[in-house]
Image (tube, rainbow, N blue to C red):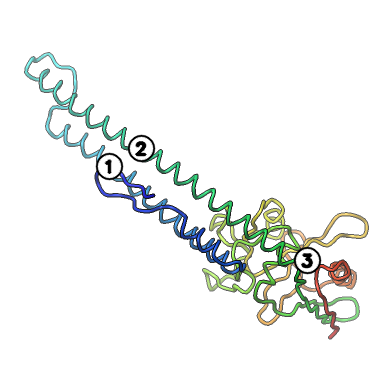
Amino acid sequence: MSETTKGGGGLGPVEPESALARLRALETLESGYEAWLELKLEHAASRARFLEEREKLDQQGSFLLGAVRAAGVEPAPSTEPGLVAASASAGDFLREAEGRLASTRAALAEREAASEARYAEAFAEIRGTLRERVQRHLAVHRPRLTLLLRRVGTERSILHVERLSGDTPVLLCFLFSGRIPSRHGFLLDDSTEDVALAPAPLYPDEGVEPSQVRPDAAGLEARVSEAQEVVPLKGMLPLRVPRPGGGEDFFRLLQRGAVLEVEVAEGTSFRNVLSREESERFAGHLLRLKLSGRIDLDLEAG
């Protein structure tokens, strides 16, 4: 099916079927994310076409009104019989033209709403399919982590995790947060839109505006907590670790070249030098995941 407007050109195909066909053809996580990206691009193009058509209709309406005014016969009360007839004729012309434009606008709005509904269904299918695939992978495959301890004096340390690749970051994101990331290669992405700034911890996806991609530690924790099915992480993995007396600490594994560095939230910022208690509690949390059969874990002290 395709969508066209009456006169003035058409919108062309806006169906999400090609992305869904890619999703259904291959069972890998990466192919699912490729289909998701394709769908996002198609959706953006569809919205741009609808916007263009609305602007054209607005221009037509403005042009017609301007033409009537320029003709000097804009509908207006008059006591001169000759002008009343001309004004009435102009009024009929303008009302007829505006009626056609209103009808075209209504039809366009209806098609746009139908298109948005189809895309919403397609996005829901892709998210659901990716979530199911992640769960199936985790049922048969345990992600492997190697935790490296680097002591800083006697009571402090820095923790590193060996670099992760492939599907492992996606699996760990779901395992740690219960949500899938918005992009497959999110963890190894160290790109930045401003060379004067460190890479942002979020993508402008899933309702996150470009101005919101650099929240402080508290804002990042809130964003992860408030996310529904998808969290738009970039260059990091979040992890909550229980405290002995209740509550949790918010940790993240931040991409640092060849390793991931463990950081803990402290107010509005993160700290990478951990106390002995924090590092042991973090390692103990991973060990619990290992003992429950959810990950494989190697511990190495440097």
Helix, strand or loop at mark 1: loop
Give whichever of 232, 84 is nearer the camera. 232
Q: Is residue 137 left or right of residue 115?
A: right
Dot 1 or dot 3: first in sequence order is 1
Q: Nearer the viewer, mark 1 or mark 3?
A: 1
Disc on res. 107: 2
Contact check, label 1 and label 2, Cβ < 8 Å: yes
Give whichever of 248, 12 is nearer the camera. 12
Give the CA separation, mark 1 to mark 3. Answer: 58 Å
Q: Number of labelled discs?
A: 3
Residue type, numbered disc 3: Val
For residue 270, above or below residue 1:
below
The percent position of residue 125, horizontal first and vertical second, equals 58, 53
Q: Residue at x 75, y 63 (%)?
A: 175
Q: Residue at x 68, y 77 (%)?
A: 256
Residue type, numbered disc 2: Ala
Contact check, label 3 and label 2, Cβ < 8 Å: no
In the rendered image, which residue does mark 1 sit on?
6
Extreme residue in the left direction: 82
Dot 1 or dot 2: first in sequence order is 1
Mark 1 nearby-residue class (10 Å; few <14, some 14–19, many ≥20): few
The percent position of residue 204, horizontal first and vertical second, equals 55, 59
In the rendered image, which residue does mark 3 sit on?
264
Q: Is residue 113 left or right of residue 277?
A: left
Helix, strand or loop at mark 3: strand
